[in-house]
Amino acid sequence: MKRLTSIIIASLPLCAMHAAVTLPEQIGDNMVLQQLADARIWGWATPGSEIKVAGDWSATPVSVKTDSDGAWTAMLPTPAGSFTPHTVTVEGDGSSLTLDNVLVGEVWIASGQSNMEMPLDGFWSCPVENANRAIAEAGGYTGRIRMCTLPLVGELTPQQRVAGQWKECTVENAPRFSAVGYYFARTLSDLIGVPVGVISAAYGGSRVEGWLPREILATYPDVDIADASSDSIPHYYRPMVMYNAMLKPVAGYTARGFLWNQGESNVGLHDTYPYHLSDMIKEWRRLWGNDSMPFYSVQLPGYEYGDGRYATSGALLREAQQKAMDITPNCGLVTSIDLQQPGQYLQIHPALKQPIGERLAWMAAVRDYGVKGLRCESPRLKEVEFNGDKAIVRLIGGEEGVGPWQGLTGFEVAGDDRVFYPAEAVNVAGPWPVLPYIEVSSPQVKEIKSVRYCFTNWPEGNVIDLRGLPLLPFRTDSW
């Protein structure tokens, strides 16, 4: 009964317990506010009371009234980003709160499962390459990067609050920062010259269904809502619980976009994944009040995925990830298939996180901040022409040719029997105006009908564009 009582008390409106102004944990010292925006500041106080919110960059406060439950929301206009620390004051109910060391810059929400959650400190027996160097350099970004890491929690009903406060980028704090989030923030801040803040809301092992609300999940014939409270289902596999406990409390914290690194736990569910992920993106955009908010995803790393290195369950999920991005506006995909290391096919947490964070930052820099001269999109299949024992592969994004010049690997071909054999791939640069292409063949297939590239769980291809961005995996056959 004591535990039940505490739950009931915790669910009461916060104003019933605190007459003074109360703020969520994410509105506080060291936070980053989105620049040149109406940044959402919210909290609770006595019903019907007046709340005033002001930044030290303006003499005019924003004044709002609390509703019948004591909740209030103020939209605070922010200036252009800079490395100058600010203060924000919140007054009401006879109290005054001063939030110190606030930066104005760019804010991103980073979510997914363990490869997004994975800190610079690494996981058990899972290191992050060059982490100690990155941590040692963190002090140079104290005034440039901030991170807010949410705890791993799940609930059956939507919550108002979640723990997790903004932290400065210091040598002491950096080991607990999401490695992908840290490298993203560091690279983006260097590129655009303003502070970058990342809210890390990632839960290891979580499926995409864990980040969707009950109302949407109830429409899926392949999802059982009862699994959310089933003791036989691992917590990280349960539907809707991360949405309720981790996403909902921070929904609407004014941000530029989303970063997503997830999919390993949905391997085997590739038929529904594109549509569930697309629904999730739309729902998150609804919560943030921006139906075109950027969403950038990371493609699955190489791994055995239970059916073997050279099977295709992981490859099918990678294909589903790409489809989700293609069917949902203003989305982008960065791949990690070239970042595996020898002997790591049983390691689901690859050590190379810096290139992933950088690729996400490059995509944001080009697509959202107009940075010129930088390339962010991997080449991908445009078309294939079958000509007997040869297949001509043309790419989008690799029109000027690809590397390496010789020794292209990762291709397979099949005939009508759909038995795939390793293929030889040759760079062909025809006379102008013929654009470069890749010619694929195998002595074991006299009449090629299908081509695949890196379409295995543990891909071993090496094709890159002239900037070093890897070719996205593909298949021309469908089952």
Image (cartoon, rainbow, N blue to C red):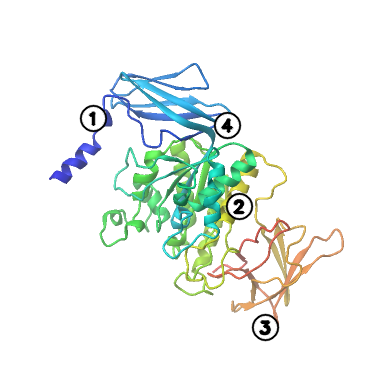
Pick whichever of labels 3 and 1 is earlier in the sequence: 1
Q: Disc 4 marks which residue?
A: 81
Q: Disc 3 marks which residue?
A: 444
Whole-number angstrom distance, CA of label 3 to CA of label 2: 38 Å
Whole-number angstrom distance, CA of label 3 to CA of label 4: 60 Å
Mark nearest the camera among 4 and 2 is 4
Classify the position of the C terminus by image quarter: bottom right
Residue 344 in percent (x, y) is at 51, 70
- Disc 1 marks a residue whose amino acid type is Met
**Image quadrant where residue 323 sits:** bottom right
Q: Disc 2 marks which residue?
A: 359
Tell me which residue sits at (26%, 32%) in the image: 13
Whole-number angstrom distance, CA of label 1 to CA of label 2: 46 Å
- Disc 2 marks a residue whose amino acid type is Arg
Whole-number angstrom distance, CA of label 4 to CA of label 2: 23 Å
Pick whichever of labels 3 and 2 is earlier in the sequence: 2
Residue 408 in percent (x, y) is at 70, 70
Pick whichever of labels 1 and 2 is earlier in the sequence: 1
Residue 68 in percent (x, y) is at 28, 24
Total numbered circles? 4
Task: From the viewer's perspective, tell me whether residue 123 is left or right of residue 389.
Answer: left
Pick whichever of labels 4 and 1 is earlier in the sequence: 1
Q: Nearer the viewer, residue 310 or 375?
A: 375
Residue extending farthest to the right is 431
Q: Nearer the viewer, residue 429 or 408?
A: 408
Q: Residues within 10 Å of mark 1 (few under 14, many from 20)?
A: few
Quick check: 166 above or below 461? above
Element at label 3: loop
Query: Do residues under tags 3 and 1 come within 8 Å of each other at their CB atoms?
Result: no
Q: Disc 1 marks which residue?
A: 17
